[in-house]
Amino acid sequence: KIFGFCAVTIGLLALTACGPNLQPYQVKLDSPYHHAVNGMKLLKLDKIEGAHREFSRAKELDLDYAPAYIGLGLVYSLRRDFPKAMDELQAAGQHVRGDHQQVALGIAFMRLYMVGRETLSAAWLLRVEEEFNQAKRLAPHRPEIYFQMGLAYKLMGLHGRPPKELDKIVRLNKGYLEEEDLVEFLSRRYGVP
């Protein structure tokens, strides 16, 4: 009996030892995705140089990764280097995969037109509205689309229009700025009184 039990136990252990070695999924830290996510976090903290490093590394790792180009476009727009920002965003358009990245690209263009409103185009609001409408068709429940449009209307001083877009942000409840914080944010970032 004991010999039979030991033989069966050793046999089962031998079978499981020869099976596939399953390891838990590990996030690859040196991946384009990881660097792009870090870059966006750094942008939110106004750490533009660090964000530039992260997006550049993401682009080095994968020349077809649209979020890397989008991030670099945002960095260059905040540095007020609008030709480079436009080049990066247009390059991102060549590498976009899926609606999520297309919407992110539209939001980046909206931000670029707002930051460069005095330099890029007299019709900057029209361009922002075009990007807004395209993004809204693809992802009507993404609050950042409405947030950016609300910022654009606030920049233009169109007081009758922003509440509609900002109300949509509140209804979607994704943690964007409260209305009283919006004025402080705008004056700090965009110089709006």
Image: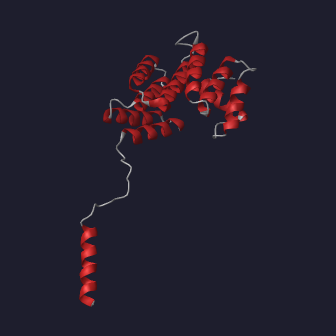
Q: Is residue 190 left or right of residue 27?
A: right
Q: Residue furthest top?
A: 122
> In this orientation, which residue lies closer to the viewer: 47 or 166?
166
Q: Is residue 183 visible?
A: no
The location of residue 172, given as percent across then percent down, is 66, 37
Q: What is the image's colouring?
A: secondary structure
Q: Quadrant of residue 191?
A: top right
Q: Residue sitting at 45 percent across and 37 percent down?
A: 39
Q: Is residue 15 visible?
A: yes
Q: Is residue 14 left or right of residue 155?
A: left
The location of residue 169, given as percent across then percent down, is 67, 34
The location of residue 193, given as percent across then percent down, is 69, 23
Q: Quadrant of residue 69?
A: top left
> In this orientation, which residue lies closer to the viewer: 11 or 57?
11
Q: How many marks?
A: 0
Q: Residue furthest right?
A: 160
Q: Residue sitting at 34 percent across and 44 percent down?
A: 30
Q: Residue sitting at 59 percent across and 32 percent down?
A: 144
Q: If the image is split into quadrants, where does the N terminus sit? A: bottom left
Q: Quadrant of residue 134?
A: top right
The location of residue 12, given as percent across then percent down, is 28, 74
Q: Residue sitting at 26 percent across and 84 percent down?
A: 6
> In this orientation, which residue lies closer to the viewer: 168 or 51?
168
Q: Is residue 104 above or below residue 127?
A: below
